[in-house]
Image (cartoon, rainbow, N blue to C red):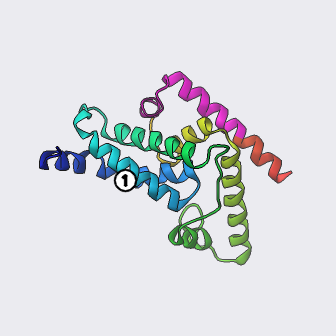
Amino acid sequence: MQTGDDRALFNEVFMPHQAEAYRLARWLTGSSSDADDVVQDAALRAFRGIRSFGAVNARAWSLTIVRNTAYSWLMKNRPKSVVFTDELNPADQQRLEHESADGTKIQTPEDIVLLKTEAGNLQRALAQLPATFREVIVLREINQMNYRDIAEITGTPIGTVMSRLSRARQLLIELLGERTS
């Protein structure tokens, strides 16, 4: 039976990482609504297993649960392949349409078209990466995690994380190069 102490520990350990959990789930599932489902399932798993939290790295522990939940969800709901959609939430779409990468306002319609094209190309290139490469890119470049935490989350040695990240970047460069040719 869960206690108030479990709830307090859950709020301290899992809840501060919900935004990162959503971003990871969003990139792994390719859909905002699917990411919501994954994060909700992950939160339930984390709450049920909060007593097993060993007071190590709360961020890595939480994101490991999200990662595992996302893959379980994908296997159940998309057994043949992982599909990436171009769906963005309204705030991200507004930001994409009206701000450049450095946060400055875009002045011309041509700038907006170029940024949308670049973002779309990047999303399509990321979607083409195998899941093992896509997840390390998302964890490193979007969630800004260090190699040790990525290794802990993915259950792989740091050297493997580094080589996957290198290979993922190389593949992205190749894929993006094909799009501009």
Q: With respect to residue 170, does 104 lie above or below?
A: below
Q: Secondary structure at mark 1?
A: helix
Quadrant housing the N terminus: top left
Q: With respect to residue 56, does 84 lie above or below?
A: below
Residue 121: x %, y % from top left: 72, 56
Q: Looking at the image, which residue is at 71% across and 77% down?
A: 109
Q: Residue furthest right?
A: 181
Residue 160 is inside the magenta segment: yes
Residue 67: x %, y % from top left: 47, 41
**Residue type, mark 1 in image:** Gln
| Residue under numbered circle 1 | 18
Q: Looking at the image, which residue is at 64% across and 53% down?
A: 84
Q: Looking at the image, which residue is at 48% across and 32% down?
A: 154
Residue 118: x %, y % from top left: 70, 59
- Residue 3 or residue 159, whichever sits in front: 3
Confirm whether residue 90 shows in the render.
yes
